[in-house]
Amino acid sequence: EVQLVESGGGLVQAGGSLRLSCAASGFTFDDYAIGWFRQAPGKEREGVSSISATDGSTYYADSVKGRFTISSDNAKNTVYLQMNSLKLEDTAVYYCAAVRSYGIAFDFTGWGSVGAMDYWGKGTLVTVSS
């Protein structure tokens, strides 16, 4: 059974940090790229960051570049999202998703778009307060 399980969400003050984890099982991790997406109330789901488990390449949305860092521990089949300098607008449910990869990270268009993901986790809530 394929599973993506997110953890690490919570309540944090603006300017603070959180580290999200995405534990994957049930598929060949090295053949996939893993992405973090988020969905704020009343908004569409959007891409945040992605990483290729094949070559370690990464991609970041402009809104999080310089503040968030994605990393992967292939031995543990786990992807992390370190979120620093959190802003109120980062409040959302954060989901991890996996797509069979071309060996690179994806940029949330085409084969990396929301609708193209093969597997999804159930999400973890991040709330940033003032």
Image (spheres, helix red, strand yellow):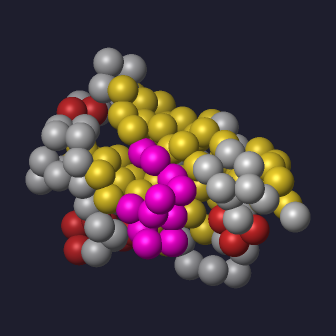
The quarter holding residue 71 reads: top left
Residue 35 appears at what percent x and percent y? Answer: 39, 53
Whether residue 3 is visible to the viewer of this picture, yes or no, is no
In this figure, what is the number of numbered marks?
0
Q: Residue at x 66, y 43 (%)?
A: 18
Residue 39 falls left or right of residue 68: right
Task: State yes or no: residue 27 in magenta.
Answer: no
- Seen as rendered, the residue at the extreme top is 75
The quarter holding residue 73 reads: top left
Residue 11 appears at what percent x and percent y? Answer: 82, 49
Residue 48 falls left or right of residue 26: right
Q: Residue at x 42, y 45 (%)?
A: 70
Whether residue 89 is visible to the viewer of this picture, yes or no, is yes
Residue 41 falls left or right of residue 72: right
Quarter of the image where the N terminus is located: top left
Q: Is residue 19 above or below residue 51?
A: above
- Seen as rendered, the residue at the extreme left is 102
Residue 120 appears at what percent x and percent y? Answer: 45, 51
Closer-to-camera residue (14/74) = 14
- Seen as rendered, the residue at the extreme right is 130
| Secondary structure predominantly adopted by residues drawn in magenta | loop
Q: Is residue 42 above or below residue 78?
A: below
Task: State yes or no: residue 67 in magenta.
Answer: yes
Closer-to-camera residue (79/115) = 79
Q: Residue at x 45, y 63 (%)?
A: 65
Residue 22 appears at what percent x and percent y? Answer: 49, 37
Closer-to-camera residue (115/87) = 87
Q: Residue at x 33, y 69 (%)?
A: 108
Quarter of the image where the C terminus is located: bottom right
Q: The magenta stretch spans which residues?
A: 60-70
The quarter holding residue 14 reads: bottom right
